[in-house]
Image (tube, rainbow, N blue to C red):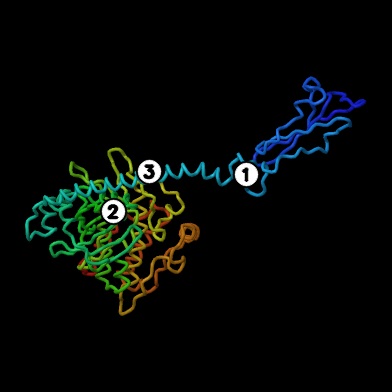
Amino acid sequence: RETCFVWLGECFCVPCVLTSAHVAWPVVSSRPRCIPKEELTPPDNPISCHHSHNVDDHFAIECCRGADFCNRYIVPTLSPSSVQIGDTAVGSSWPSTHELAFAIGGPICLVCVVLMVVYQLWQQRRRHFRYEMETSLESEPILLPPGQTIKDMIEMTTSGSGSGLPLLVQRSIARQIQLVEVIGKGRYGEVWRGRWRGESVAVKIFSSRDERSWFREVEIYQTVMLRHDNILGFIAADNKDNGTWTQLWLITDYHENGSLFDYLMRIPVDTATMCKMAYSIANGLAHLHMEILGTQGKPAIAHRDIKSKNILVKSSGACAIADLGLAVRYDSATNSVDIPPNPRVGTKRYLAPEVLDESINMNHFDSFKRADIYALGLVLWEIARRCNIGGIYEDYQLPYYDLVPADPTIEEMRKVVCTDRQRPALPNRWQSCEALRVMSKIMKECWYHNSAARLTALRIKKTIANLGAQEDLKI
């Protein structure tokens, strides 16, 4: 605020003072100040003290002289049309808030809409092109010998130990499969029972957002020398794109008994079946964990998600390990672990202590194998609970059913397994049956908190084989 003192009717410092008001959109502000003497032209009626009376003006001046601080209480008045109330603009030439937002946002939205339309058209054209390419490929079918089963083709093309059928044969089989019914659902998608030339096959359908899981599982299944009686048999993989949506198919052997989880929920097992199941799971896991050297060798593989829902029961009662989407491979030549770029982790209930407390050495492949062994011990406990001895057996339950909720968190599992160091209870009656006593001992040696002290899959396999020989059991 500039002021001046008047001496005998004239300004002491400058001859005149004025108050100016202007619009700083959308606020009306005023500022008193003094005018230097040299700017007072003409002296009696200075031009500096005049303002236009045009209705669109946003600036007003009033001058005074004759008293000290004469401009203290002067507020110049703007024309009525320049100041409006509410959210409307100040002055007819200033845009309102809504007008300004529309002026800025409108073109941006228009550009975004145009870009989206262009992108959608490009996607449609791309899908249509891919669909036409695949349709043209189907129009030239690969001649598969009539009457030949999938098993015959696999044995003929891979000698029973290779990485699977040629890719074009896989695609030809996939395109001829008819889906019959849904037999399972999971976080990845659905599992269907399909039919190919009268044979039942399992079709695991991934959604496009789970492409990494599909790709990883296919990649592992096509590993040379992976085929094994106790690992789910891989048949084919394909992507179905009809121009609108994409499905990722993984086709495997079909086992009507379903998963070990489903089987144990329905049916108790006898001692022989318990040993057969335990032996076959350990046998399949030992094959996964084992490295086969040579030009047609196999890398060591750790499963990382062993659980009863990822193990299938064959018609013979033996089991096959499935779901290799989280598996890791070990390359001994470079001493490196091939960890998949997948945000999924194993099932929390089956995670080993070192995984729960994050002390696992991710660069040491044996760490992953030992975590598999811990989970295997829990699966053996599930089987043993359903073993019928003299008409006595327990109801089916998941591991730690009495210690954690149905869908436990990592923190809840860490407290039970790592902090409290609790393990599933072993009924006293198991000590009266040699088979259950041996199984109890195996479980305890799979559950050690110190992962280095746990058994290997090969050792478990041999122990159960010896048990079967002693008990004269056919496993």
* Residue 27 picture quarter: top right
Depth check: give the residue in front, 94 or 193.
94
Report the residue that reaches farthest toward the top. Answer: 38
Which residue in the rendered view is the most extreme toward the left?
146
- How packed mark 1 is, by other alpha carbons closer than 10 Å (few <14, some 14-19, many 20 or more), is some
The residues bearing labels 2 and 3 have C-alpha atoms spaced at a distance of 42 Å
Looking at the rendering, which quadrant does residue 66 occupy? top right
Q: Are marks 1 and 2 in contact (CB under 8 Å)?
A: no
Callout 1 secondary element: loop
Q: Earlier in the sequence, mark 1 or mark 2?
A: 1
Numbered badge on residue 320: none
Pointer 1 residue: 89
Look at label 2 and name its amino acid.
Answer: Thr
Which amino acid type is marked by label 3? Answer: Asn
Please state the total of marks drawn on the protein image.
Answer: 3
Front-lying residue, 33 or 393: 33
- The percent coordinates of residue 138 (x first, y second) are 15, 51
Residue 60, x across and y down, in percent:
73, 35
Secondary structure at numbered mark 3? loop
Question: Can see residue 200?
Answer: yes
Residue 2: x percent and y percent? 80, 30
The residue pinned by badge 3 equals: 363
**Closer to the observer: label 2 or label 3?**
2
Q: Circle 2 is placed at which residue position?
A: 244
